[in-house]
Image (spheres, helix red, strand yellow):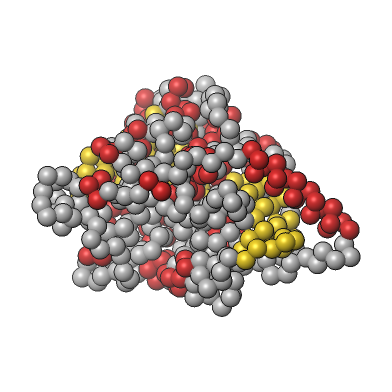
Amino acid sequence: MTSPICVGFRSEHVTVCFGSSFLSTEALSFNDLGFGDLGCYGHPSSLTPNLDRLAAAGLRFTDFYCTSPVCSPSRASLLTGRYQTRSGIYPGVLYPGSIGGLPLNETTIAEVLKPLGYTTTAVGKWHLGVGSNGMFLPTKQGFDQYLGIPYSHDMGPCHNLTCFPPDVKCFGLCDVGTVMVPLVYNDVIKQQPVNFLDLERAYSDFLTNFITTAAKKKQPFFLYYPSHHTHYPQYAGPRAARQSLRGPFGDALLEFDNTIGNLLETLEKTGVINNTLVFFTSDNGPELMRMSRGGNAGLLKCGKGTTYEGGMREPAIAFWPGTIQPGVTHEMASTLDILPTIASLAGAKLPQVQLDGVDMTEILLKKGPSKRETMMFYPTDPSKMYGLFALRLGKYKAHFYTRGATHSGTTPDKDCPVFAVLKAHDPPLIFDLEADPSENYPLPLVGRPDLQTLLERIKKVKEQFEASMVFGESQISKGTDPQLEPCCNPQCSPKPTCCHC
């Protein structure tokens, strides 16, 4: 038997670790982190020494995708290996009082690993529903423990969001008329409003204690850490505030990076680092409407809310000392592939449902070819009527519909903001993503029989996929109920202001 393996992903920050006498994994995911936000992906002023260390000693992906350009649906896909259209996490995102959530009959990575004796924990931003009596929280979805904020931290009054020093308010508007953002432990509210300046220290302590305990028991573990730091409005505690060159966004990124350093140190001290897979990625692209406080997509087009590359292609790093050789891969992969890959490495049974993910083991262990030939792109509001907005086949990407988004405003590119209304393309716009990753130059189809052949193949792949897609009942369309908003004093009055403890 081997020791634990930790796998970490980054999507808002998502970290997943699982370890034991078998394999331990950490999945780390960042919120609204763009392809161009990390030092190891070329940003000149981001301070991310620990993530850069992961990239230098691990495998860095250049063609890694999420499944939605907004939070809730992309997280559902990461944890289930299925497009959000199947699980019903569409359109848009879940809210504090949402009636629906990730259906309990969906199988998460944690539930795949539990039969093998894994101990599992989730830390950070959940955003897959709370529901009546916390029925959709992580502890109902295969996780033994949970510490975090159950939805986005801007879904609450602004007075709950302070920067360092404490007398400086975070810039921007947040939801009013909503309960203050809570900190939840398992299914109990421990603090409302949460103290953001102390939050990352609490997360770091919780994570290191979890790994240390699992290592002492020689029990395999799975750690899922979806951080919310780089989601707007950013915050950072005293150790990171004003310590980066990049302002509030850089400070928030640095604070998360410090926690990655603590995790790596804990894995080393407990002797399980060589038995832990750490996978890091992001949930969707940067919120460009926030300008310098919204992240950066690098050379990719547009960002959050759009199906252009900037909204869907993410940084991703796989780290496993002694097993994964350092390097860079240009093979196509996705957050969908995390579940089947972890199941394969751990020797777990796959859920008996239609999976959209493929096993990445060949890429990770042998730098071999990907089993993924295609990537499908749904908008934030997928529907049977419109179907796919875009499809990638090999190095080519076809856009059947294009549309801008509020999240991607303020850029000079006229295709990105909300004013770029829905436009159908027949024939589709086709880009060669190897020659033109910025999607600036659609290929001319006239006089190119090779491209006509490619177009016919793309259309066939699209038709076959859409015929196989069974849309699950929309959980988000079930609406909201103010009585479901988390409140540490549920019988108090008047709500929501009395929800304070």
Q: Position of residue 419 (x, y in %)?
A: 52, 73
Residue located at (53% from left, 64% from top) = 303
Q: Residue at x 59, y 71 (%)?
A: 415
Q: Position of residue 26 (x, y in %)?
A: 46, 40
Identify the residue at horizontal 67%, vertical 36% (top origin).
Answer: 362
Q: Quadrant of residue 178?
A: bottom left
Identify which residue, 384 or 378, lies in the foreground.
Answer: 384
Q: Is residue 193 above or below residue 221?
A: below
> Measuring 49% from the left and 75% from the top, which residue is drawn there?
410
Residue extending furthest bottom? 412
Residue 239 shows up from this direction: no
- Vertical order, 130 against 65 (above or below): above
Q: Name the spot of residue 424 as percent of width and height, x first.
A: 65, 63
Residue 237, given in percent of the width and then of the height, sits at 29, 60
Left or right side of 301 for 269: left
Q: Left of 200 or right of it: where is 291?
A: right
Answer left or right for 494 relative to 388: left
Q: Give 198 or 398, whichever is nearer the viewer.
A: 398
The residue sitting at the front extreme is 385
The picture quadrant where one finds residue 435 is: bottom right
Relative to residue 2, is residue 33 depicted above or below? below
Asked if 370 appears above or below 451 in the picture, the reply is: above
